Amino acid sequence: MDYLNSKYTIKKDSIKEPDQYLGAKIFKWRIDGVEDPDKTRWAMSAEKYVKLALSDVEKTLEAVEKKLPAKASSPFSSNDYRPELDATPELDDAKTNYFQGLIGVLRWCVELGRVDILVETTLLSSYLASPREGHLDQALHIFAYLKKHARSSLVFDDTLPDLSRFDFKKCDWKETYPDAREVLPPNRPQARGNAVSITSYTDASHAGCRVTRRSHTGIFIFVNRSLIIWFSKRQNTVESSTFGSEFIALKTAVDLIEGLRYKLRMFGIPIDGPASVLCDNESVVRNTSAPESTLKKKHTAIAYHRCREAVAADVIDVGFVRSKQNLADLATKTVPAPLRQEYCRQLLW
């Protein structure tokens, strides 16, 4: 900072620890139970941004003598609500513009760490061009949920995760993929500091869209125990089986993991071995953990070989996790309130 101050004019009171970033509050968080003389970690919260957004929404509703729903244990009013099946009248231009603004605010809440509204915001985002009254009601219901669950922080915990309860099989892939190797940045700096581990939870809601029958991919990626990447998106193809949709989701996770590993290495951060990818489909785990497994569905051939080659190149290891323990469920479907709270306890503080 002294060097920058010698080149540029910097206000004295601006040289301090960070306290905000693009609407998010940045602060230090004390973690209990961590054997470390300094138990504090950096954390990020969208609480301030959410409060300002809620204030604007409630003022707008008050002008038309309306209020947010009083009860909102989940982002959607019902776990059975499907935006693609909504047959309510289409919004006029003014309300359409208002709906688009609400979705923009919700998407930024997600960017600031409110992953508990990730899939609901993603589903409503598909109807920005021609929303319906029901879509607007559900967007307002998400704000009611945020009002009731205002406090949530994303803590960047650098402690290593405990994956001992998961089984990751090591096999010899030389005969199957003899040239498989990870692409390393040729101009990467020398790695310094402690090595980090990467863990990913992946899931797919098979045929989740009731109209197109496309599946929905959900991915959470952690560096050590810090949630770094969250992904929720409808797949581009219709898969005829859960096996196919889960493989498509795993392929997307591989793409994201490879990009993250490349970026970390360009930062000079060492990486401790392959990324641990947890999937709740035993067939996918078996096909990516055993070289002798054969593909019986040609339709998923590209995703099949893409993931297996990543395993052979030591980019990822794939292990099995039970469905109710798969955190990526929160990014693929609307889950009941008790299960949502359990997932949020593991993701948000």
Image: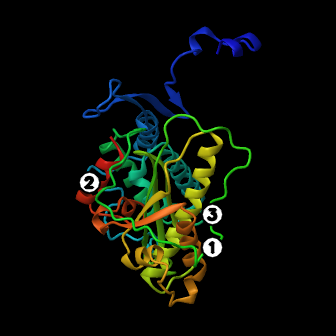
The amino acid on which the numbered mark 3 sits, given as a three-letter code, is Arg
Q: For the residues carrying marks 2 and 1, which lies nearer the camera in this image?
A: 1
On the image, the x and y values in percent for residue 114 come to 42, 47
On the image, the x and y values in percent for residue 83 come to 45, 69
Q: Secondary structure at mark 2?
A: helix
Q: Is residue 269 left or right of residue 220?
A: right
- Can residue 133 be seen in this snapshot? no
- Residue 46 vertical position relative to residue 211 in the rendered view, above or below: above
Q: For the residues carrying marks 1 and 3, which lies nearer the camera in this image?
A: 1
Mark pair 3, 2: CA separation: 38 Å
Label 2 with label 1: CB-CB less than 8 Å: no
In the picture of the structure, the residue carrying the numbered disc 1 is 178
- Can residue 35 be seen in this snapshot? yes
Disc nearer the start of the sequence (3/2): 3
In the picture of the structure, the residue carrying the numbered disc 3 is 181
Mark pair 2, 1: CA separation: 43 Å
The amino acid on which the numbered mark 2 sits, given as a three-letter code, is Glu
In the picture of the structure, the residue carrying the numbered disc 2 is 342
Name the image quarter holding the C terminus: top left
- Residue 283 vertical position relative to residue 109 in the rendered view, above or below: below
Question: Residue drawn at (55%, 68%), measured in percent from left and top?
Answer: 312
| Pointer 2 local density, CA inside 10 Å: few below 14, some 14–19, many at least 20 | few
Label ID, residue 296: none
Q: Secondary structure at mark 1?
A: loop
